[in-house]
Image: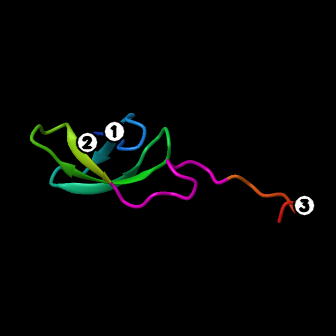
């Protein structure tokens, strides 16, 4: 196993994920804003590049606002 370190494109948080030794890409979710990303090995073995998979509802990610019965 090796560590893939990547920057979130939405909130700029640094994230880390353990991947298999031969892996060149993976998916992960930012621990801060919960935006899903595809990560790919970069020029440096530890630092990987990231691109968002698809935005979560509500903009930058995170949980959706719950709607009460009175609002619906």
Earlier-in-chain disc, 1 versus 3: 1
- Residue tagged by mark 2? 4
Can you name the residue that lies furthest to the right here?
70
Q: Which one is in front, 24 or 50?
A: 50
Q: Is residue 6 left or right of residue 67?
A: left
Is residue 45 part of the magenta span, yes or no? no
Residue at mark 1:
16
Q: CA distance from mark 1 to mark 3?
A: 41 Å
The residue lying toward the viewer, choosing from 3 and 63, is 63
**Depicted 52 relative to depicted 1: above or below:** below
Q: Which residues are magenta?
A: 52-64
Residue 66 in view of the camera: yes
Which label is found at residue 70? 3
Q: Which residue is located at x 74 percent, y 55 percent?
A: 66
Residue 53 placement (x, y as % from top left): 37, 60
Sequence-wise, the earlier of marks 2 and 3 is 2
Residue drawn at x 14%, y 44% is: 42
Instruction: Give left or right: position of 17 versus 56.
Output: left
Q: Residue 2, position in %: x, y?
A: 22, 42
Bin the neighbour count of mark 3 within 10 Å (Cα to Cα): few under 14, some 14-19, many 20 and up: few
Please name which of the two marks, 1 or 3, marks the residue nearer to the observer. 3
Mark 2 vs mark 3, foreground winner is 3
Secondary structure of the magenta portion, mostly?
Answer: loop
Q: Residues within 10 Å of mark 2 (few under 14, many from 20)?
A: many
For numbered disc 3, what is the local secondary structure?
loop
The residue shown at (58%, 54%) is: 58
């Amino acid at each position: 196993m090796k560590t893939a370190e990547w920057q979130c494109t939405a909130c700029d948080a640094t994230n880390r994920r353990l991947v298999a030794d031969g892996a060149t890409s993976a998916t992960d979710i930012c621990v801060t804003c919960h935006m899903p990303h595809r990560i790919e090995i970069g020029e440096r073995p530890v630092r990987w590049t990231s691109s968002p998979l698809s935005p979560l509802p509500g903009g930058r990610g995170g949980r959706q606002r719950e709607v009460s019965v009175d609002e619906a």
